[in-house]
Image: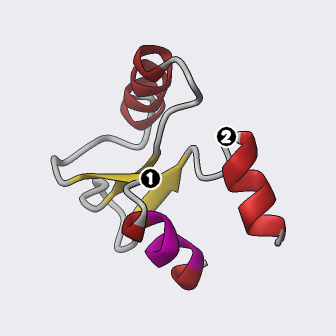
Amino acid sequence: LGEFLTALQDTGEVLRVAAAVDPQGELAAITQRVIERAGDGGPALLFTAVRNSAWPVVTNLLGQPRRLCRALG
């Protein structure tokens, strides 16, 4: 997963979200809005400050056919 995220970051397909977000709905709402505005599946989103979580969260990782194909090799 780490290598895949790095490869996506290198091609500009990951948007980092540093603002604190609530995992109970806010995270999903932000993801949905970004996808709708992008119109093409949108970027993967890496939330680095998820409240009550020691871990970052990535959403929409396989949200575009080209990323899914890339993940599967």
N-term-proximal mark, 1 vs 2 = 1
- State the separation of the CA atoms marked 1 and 2: 10 Å
Q: Residue at x 67, y 40 (%)?
A: 64
On the picture, is 34 further left or further right than 28? left
Q: Position of residue 55 (x, y in %)?
A: 40, 72
Q: Residue at x 19, y 48 (%)?
A: 20
Dominant secondary structure (helix, strand or loop) of the stretch shown in magenta: helix
- Would you say residue 46 sits in the magenta stretch? no
Q: Is residue 55 shown above or below 23?
A: below
For the residue pair 54 and 43, the one nearer the viewer reads as 43
The quadrant of the picture occupied by the N terminus is bottom right
**Label ID, residue 61:** none
Q: Residue at x 49, y 65 (%)?
A: 8
Q: Is residue 2 shown above or below 8?
A: below
**Label ID, residue 64:** 2
For the residue pair 53 and 1, the one nearer the viewer reads as 1
Q: Position of residue 16 (x, y in %)?
A: 28, 54
For the residue pair 1 and 21, the one nearer the viewer reads as 1
